[in-house]
Image (cartoon, grey):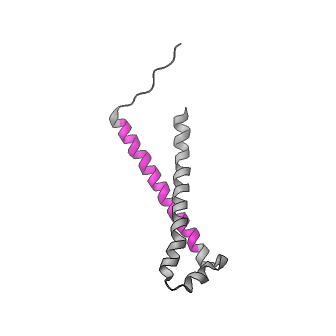
Amino acid sequence: MGPEPPFRSMPEAASRDHRRVLRHLAMRALYGVLAGAVAAGALIMLDIGSVGTLIARSTDPLLAAATVLAPFALTGAAAGCAIGLLPYLRKFRR
């Protein structure tokens, strides 16, 4: 038997699938941001590495806390998207 023709989907189905994938990735990114924020909060609250003390003694503690929180949240979002994308990569590899 010869090679099968490539799979072609209808534009509506492709659009629906793209929206579904983007919604899935957005939810995973939100979970990752939440996990990163919890990790940064634990780092500050437990005063690991004197981070909480340094933030408390800062002249602008809000900016110092945001400086710690933002990278954790962004890293969590990236990790959440990467982990959320794994089932789709396996699905389309076949």
Location of residue 36 in the rendering, given as x and y in whole percent from the top left corner: 55, 65
- Total marks placed: 0
Tell me the residue at 45%/24% (across/down).
6
Tell me the residue at 55%/34% (across/down).
93
Residue 84 counted in the magenta span: no
Residue 17 counted in the magenta span: yes
Tell me the residue at 36%/36% (across/down).
13
Location of residue 53 in the rendering, given as x and y in whole percent from the top left corner: 61, 83
In the rendered image, the vertical position of residue 89 relative to residue 75, given as above or below: above
- Seen as rendered, the residue at the extreme front is 59
- Seen as rendered, the residue at the extreme left is 12
Q: Look at the magenta stretch and give its main secondary structure.
A: helix
Span highlighted in magenta in the image: 13-41
In the figure, residue 79 lies in which quadrant? bottom right
In the rendered image, the vertical position of residue 19 relative to residue 4, given as above or below: below
In the figure, residue 17 lies in which quadrant? top left
In the rendered image, the vertical position of residue 8 relative to residue 42, given as above or below: above
Location of residue 14 in the rendering, given as x and y in whole percent from the top left corner: 38, 37
